[in-house]
Amino acid sequence: MKKNLTIGIAGAGGDGVVAIGRFLQKIAASQGYFSQMPRYYGAQIRGGGSALKLGLDAESLSLPRDTVDIMLCFNWKKYLEVNQELRLGQDTVVLYEKDPPAAMDLPGFAFRIAFSDKAMLTTGKLRNKNLVALGLLLRILGISEKQTKQTIDGDAELHLLQENLRGLQAGEQLFSQFSFPDLRLCPAKDVSAKIVLHGNAAVGKAAIHAGCRAFFGYPITPSAEVMQEIQKGLPRTAGAFLQAEDEIAASGMVVGASLAAGRAMTATSGPGLDLMTEMMGLAIAAETPLVIIDLQRCGPSTGIPSKS
């Protein structure tokens, strides 16, 4: 049994990569495991890839390792965009659905699994392949089925699993069809449930605690999580929240609020920041505070919001 494990997951937009990580992290936390989960997003406006690296530890909070113990891959092209972050070792267990490029050598423990076919057969929905994969991962890790069900029943954010238990169970049943090496996690040293708080949510909570009373933004991955957190918290402080029509408008509203002596901010990611440069120039010229949280993800904007 393992004291800690690092799991890598990669795929294209729509594969539900981040959802698997989020669900697995919450289920593991409910049983006392510590975790950290950095995520990676492509620069494309639409159709990009996403990946994550989830570290689970039975004793203490530790960083995920460079080389993953388990690699779940839905799309090899997207994996190769982040393979320096999700390195395969000689003993890495690889779970994949489609064959890798001919020039790519997989470790000895590589298993081709028809997640999509299983999802269609059991739930009638192709998009539930990520839940089938999640069910298999839970069995490989040896995470208690009874406690998993209790966590799902008691957590409103896990309602998707409740509605698609057949997909989760189908993944658990796949375990007996393959000869996986023993990658079960040791029981958690302290079984009390751990709080899962992602950095983006922490930014939102901290902003409100620091006195932010107005937020104007436009959703873009991954900064939309800051918007969601602030949207939940601002009403309790009689603050103002508005989803603008684009990033240009959002940053302009922050400048306007600052001119009226309000504590306001916005959040965006790479392409959105490009669109805010005009208002950044105005704020600099007018010597007006403009608070922008820029979260990861580089890449140019399409320019569509600025068409006349």
Image: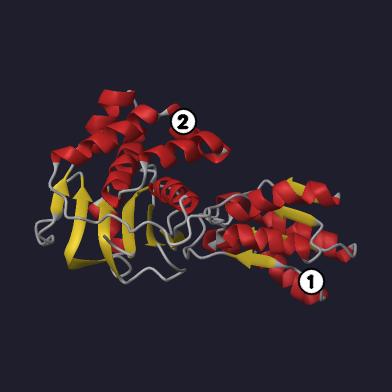
Q: Nearer the viewer, residue 136 or 268?
A: 136
Which of these two is toward me, 188 or 249? 188
- Tell which tag, 2 or 1, sits nearer the viewer: 2
Q: Amino acid at mark 2?
A: Gln
Residue type, numbered disc 1: Pro
Q: Are marks 2 and 1 in contact (CB under 8 Å)?
A: no
* Residue at which label 1 appears: 289
Residue 246 appears in the picture as rendered: no
- In percent of width and height, residue 112 lies at 15, 45
Horizontal side of residue 76 vs 304, given as left or right: left
Quarter of the image where the N terminus is located: bottom left
Residue found 51% across the figure and 65% down from its top: 296
Viewer-closest of 261 and 234: 234
Would you say 153 lies left or right of 83 here?
right
Residue placed under numbered mark 2 in the picture: 162
| Residue 78 visible in the picture | yes
Q: Secondary structure at mark 1?
A: loop
SS of the residue under disc 2: helix
